[in-house]
Image (cartoon, helix red, strand yellow):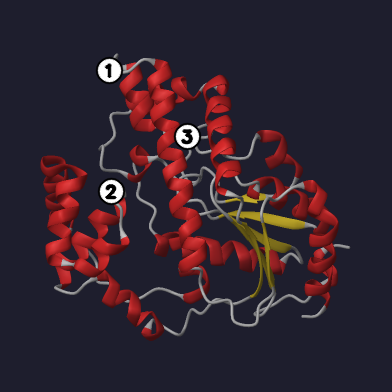
Amino acid sequence: MNAGDAAVGPTGPVIIVTGPTASGKSGLALRLAETFGGVVVNADSMQVYRELAILTARPDLAAMRSVPHRLYGVLPGVERCSAGRWRVMALAEIAAAHAEGKVPIVVGGTGLYLRALVEGLSPVPEVPEATRAEAQALYRNLGGEKFHAVLAERDPAMAARLHPSDTQRLLRAWEVMETSGRSLAEWQADRGDADPAEPPLFRAFWLISQPARQDLYTACDARFLAMIQAGAPDEVRALNALRLDPALPIMKALGVRELSAHLSGELSLEDAVAKAQQATRNYAKRQATWLRTQLPSVGREPVMHFEQLSESLDGRIFSEIRRFLLTG
């Protein structure tokens, strides 16, 4: 069966594959695309940047040649990709896939992006560059723990949601409070008042990987070692040679800080790997928590949860997907 057999148009089908890092999402998305004539659309905030193919676990060339892949490596690291910018690109790719009679398969673990895709965006005001620079300078001076404490005094609602190591979101919360005088949590609560002219134009089928904690951590550790073998240190060396602003999102990618410290002689490779593995496990834990507590409302849309995505489950998954595609 291919997507030509499925309903398309303004309520066409979309398959969303999500879960923590290293939980098997990309492999399943590839198999789905091969089986149903699909287009894989990236929903990972770091895989949009072209300079870090290895360290962000971007699908390899063989995978990208076997089925269409979109929004992978499409932006230079010198640019910032926001949830709003990604949403515009993703909706365009979804519409293009439907126009071609293909099934869009959105895959990634960036919760903010998925929430923006299915629920729309709240009308948060633009942050002036001067305010952004001020926030970054304050963060550099204080460090994560103290910056988090300062944010907690001004915006306890957002501080309670964020970990001191979640630099990008801490900065965003501070910037919005400084710019508007309102908590980002309040703006997000207004999401229902966002522009109705651009709602999510699709029917979604959710496939959610939620591995057991220890299995997930083991997979994270093994994958980072594989990245080292594949040349991640050289990739980080090339990134550092660009002398990008340390506050840019790409510079916050998992492993960049630790491997940079190794390349500068501050850490042994063994210590850098251990620290990067710990950071990856911490991130995977936060993603798993988001899936349990903040998953966007799926209403009556079909959803399947799995402890671990694997080819042994493909028969069951594909059967449900066929039913979904034929009942539109």
Q: Quadrant of residue 132?
A: bottom left
Disc 2: CA contacts within 10 A as few (<14), some (14-19) or many (>=20): some
Structural crowding at the residue carrying mark 1, measured as other residues with C-alpha within 10 Å and reported as few (<14), some (14–19) or many (≥20)? few
Real-space CA distance between mark 1 and mark 2, rounded to the nearest whole angstrom: 22 Å
> Which badge, 1 or 2, comes first in the chain's sequence?
2
Measured Cα–Cα span from mark 3 to mark 1: 22 Å
Quick check: 170 left or right of 277?
A: left
Q: Nearer the viewer, mark 3 or mark 2?
A: 2
Q: Secondary structure at mark 3?
A: loop
In x, y percent, where is residue 228? 52, 23
Tell me what residue is drawn at x 61 percent, y 42 percent. 215
Query: How far from the left and from the top, in percent, is residue 322?
Result: 83, 68
Among the 4 quarters of the image, the one containing residue 99? bottom right
Q: Is residue 118 visible?
A: yes
| Residue nearest the observer in this picture, 290 or 5 | 290
Left or right of 79 on screen, residue 120:
right
Q: How many marks?
A: 3
Residue at the disc numbered 2: 167
User: Which mark, by number, is residue 266?
Assistant: 1
Quadrant the N terminus occupies: bottom right
- Left or right: residue 19 versus residue 68 is left
Q: Tell me where residue 131 appears, x and y as whole percent.
A: 14, 57
Residue in view at x 31 percent, y 50 percent:
166
The x and y percentages for residue 304 are 69, 66
Q: Which mark is residue 290?
A: none
Residue at label 3?
A: 52
In the structure shown, which secondary structural element does the residue marked by tag 2 occupy? helix
Type of amino acid at the residue the image marks with label 1: Glu
Residue 254 in view (yes/no): no
Which one is earlier in the sequence, the residue at label 3 or at label 2? 3
Residue 185, picture quadrant: bottom left
